[in-house]
Image (cartoon, grey):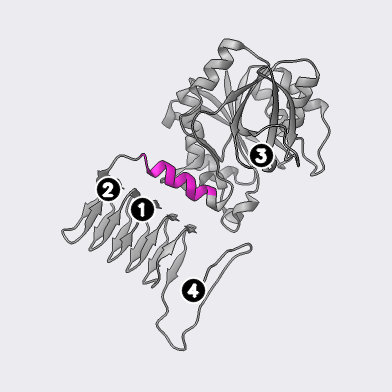
Amino acid sequence: MKGLILSGGKGTRLRPLTHTSAKQLIPIANKPVLFYAVEAMVDAGIKDIGIIVGETKDEIEEAVGDGSTWGAKIKYILQEEPRGLAHAVLVAKDYLDGEPFVMFLGDNLIKGGIVDFVAEFRKEKPNALILLTPVKNPSEFGVAELIDGRVVRLEEKPKEPKSNLALVGVYIFDKNIMKAASSIKPSLRDELEITDAIQHLIDSGLQVKPHIVKGWWKDTGKLEDILEANRILLEGIEPEIIGKVDEKSKIFGRVRIEKGAEIINSNIRGPAVIGENTKIIDSYIGPFTSVYYNVSITKSEIEHSIILENSTLLEIGSRLEDSLIGKDVTVYKVHTKPKAYKLMLGDHSLVGII
């Protein structure tokens, strides 16, 4: 069995961050989202992994490498235009070479991984096994209708859902998905939808079975979901202090301070993680905060936020919370008069001012 991780797409819901960076590389608890997908594959015994890439190919390839970090072998497959998940399957046809495969959306997180999911497919050998989870708002998702334990219909964002079971971004297919993906027509948004391909399998009399997620699942395509995933993962971290903490600083709860980090006259209240070579000076870092590497935070307060690499926060005044700060960003308090906000913002930015 092979793995196929989808890491193309434009990440429109996370702009402006994703104007210049891959959304799959945004760190959750100081680890890029995409890494969790690779780890889930390897933990399930899948070592041959293809990654579908688009315009951020170079960035993703530099971050992930050849897969040897995880004991895997990774091949990069270019999808020149993001024309849908079923299109990505067709792009990977030569790589998959008729083998069954797990398809994993690279911006999804599944606590507990996919070991049971893969084991069920190997035991039952359906033509497709799809991951489902109960949701409160099924009309916002692709929804599966089940009869006697089999999937009989899929509907994308239905006005009147037949169930509360939403499709999670992980699937296992045998070779029949190639014919199905080749047989469907583009949707109204001009994409080959994986839901249409799966429905084609069903209509062709092939077996599509459900697997219900027992833990939590997050699609990290929106800010609130990224912060929620960060919160959940930080709750499970093991406290560890490798960097330096001076005698004036206080550490409370589950806190990980990574190599080369320095905490000076500051309070860190966990769960929180402070990345490599980051400096926290005269500041407060509150619960559910992840600070990535080479960050400088001075005379500032931050809580329930994610700060990316090489950024600087200097005397920001009010507490920063519920925020995602991109890489190489500077936020500082202006002391000159007349007092005024000075902003340099990209398209689709979101700023709250008090």
The answer to whether residue 243 is seen in the rendering is: yes
Amino acid at the residue labelled 4: Ile
Please tell me which of labels 1 and 4 falls first in the chain: 1
* Residue 272 sits above or below residue 201 on the image: below
Horizontal placement of 349 versus 341: left or right? Answer: right
Q: Earlier in the sequence, mark 2 or mark 3?
A: 3
Where does residue 235 sit, x and y in percent of width and height?
A: 37, 42
Q: CA distance from mark 1 to mark 4?
A: 22 Å
Q: Quadrant of the N terminus?
A: top right
Residue 134 coordinates in the image, percent (x, y): 59, 33
From the viewer's side, name the closer residue of 60 and 9: 9
- Kindly report the distance in space between the C-alpha atoms of the residues bearing marks 1 and 3: 31 Å
The residue wearing badge 1 is 287
The residue lying furthest to the left in this view is 247
Residue under numbered circle 4? 354
Q: In the rendered structure, find residue 138 and report the number of the disc placed on it.
A: 3
Magenta span: 225-236
Q: Which mark is residue 253?
A: 2
- Is residue 183 placed above or below 340 in the rendered structure? above
